[in-house]
Image (cartoon, helix red, strand yellow):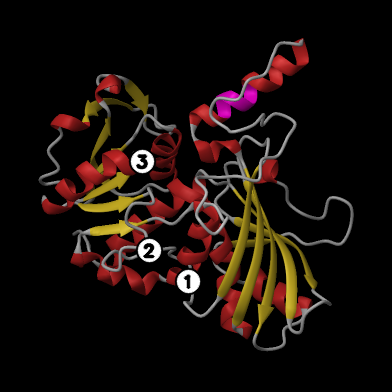
Amino acid sequence: MGYRVVVVGATGNVGREMLNILAEREFPIDELAAVASARSQGVEIEFGETGRMVKVKNIEHFDFTGWDIALFAAGSGPTAIYAPKAAAAGCVVIDNSSLYRMDPDVPLIVPEVNPDAIDGYKRKNIIANPNCSTAQMVVALKPLHDKATITRVVVSTYQSVSGAGKEGMDELFEQSRAIFVGDPVAPRKFTKQIAFNVIPHIDTFLDDGFTKEEWKMVVETKKILDPKIKVVATCVRVPVFVGHSEALHVEFENEISAIEAQNVLREAPGVMLVDKREDGGYVTPIECVGDFATYVSRVREDPTVENGLALWCVSDNLRKGAALNAVQIAELLGRRHLKKG
């Protein structure tokens, strides 16, 4: 016996990926609804590689009554309107936007890291999915924190344009093509040219000079992993279509060697350690596309601090950073609370 599942924002990058992952992981579904804005009503989209086509419904007229789980990939605006309606109708919302992440009554979940926190979902019938860059980082940090207690993290991100949606991917493609044929290049989605460039600016600037993306990494890591951990982030957009990368410098309360860290990471859930000290003995974004794992490479001791490590972390941001984590939350919810049969 399965669940009645709604995917909201089903025609976007993350929504389509949610449908793919639901099919790939054979999530138990009795009935599936694909929902999006009015302009997508009637469009048919494929449910993974099953060959089954699903007709998109208009969210303005959709009734969530009787549905078990709604995976939201619609952005904060539509989510603010429709997530409370779904939750009030008894449908558990798993939201990919930033809207509810710091709400104290909404659990912020990465199943490999803080599964027990999901038990608080009944306060609002809503569960939040973290920021893509935070999700992969805490998967890599959790086993190390359990081993030696992390006190401080300095992270620099190299985030792909798919994190900015289809418009970001289109802009990188169009600008790259324009440069090759000598056409003028004008930024639209991004603040500066993204093709053959990097932009140290994601989301809006805050009064302290950090961006909102950087702030998210700080506060979400504290909520998910440990409020005592100090975090500072620099988030950078790079001309990569899919796959976020992170350079992490981690300080610990207790001593931990690179070899010990490698052994811990090798056994950690959700982590794939690829760390050979040779040419090509590491993972790059293009190699992680379509995969579920958070890859860790370049683990080494940091000689500038006591009890410090440096490492490299890569993941498919449309998967672990968004759609996969949401489906894993749904699986966790099913195991702990919404058991069928």
Q: In the image, what residue occupies the spot 27% across and 38% down?
A: 78
Image vertical order of residue 230 relative to residue 191, above or below: below
Quarter of the rendering containing residue 159 = top right
Residue 252, labelled with which disc? none
Residue on which the image places disc 2: 108
Magenta-drawn stretch contains 170: yes
Q: Which of marks 1 and 2 is in front?
A: 1
Residue 200 placed where, x, y %? 65, 45
Magenta-drawn stretch contains 199: no
Farthest-out residue, front = 207
Magenta segment's dominant SS is: helix
Give the magenta-colored segment's residue range: 169-173
Quarter of the rendering containing residue 208 = bottom right
Q: Which of 48 and 296 is in front in this view?
A: 296
Crowd class of label 2 (few under 14; some 14 to 19; many from 20; radius 10 Å): many
Q: Which comes sooner in the sequence, label 3 or label 1?
A: 3
Image vertical order of residue 14 relative to residue 41, above or below: below
Residue 222, labelled with which disc? 1
Between marks 1 and 2, how big is the CA–CA gap? 11 Å
Q: Which comes sooner in the sequence, label 1 or label 2?
A: 2
Residue 264 placed where, x, y %? 65, 76
Between marks 2 and 3, how big is the CA–CA gap? 16 Å
Q: Marks 3 and 2: in contact by CB < 8 Å?
A: no
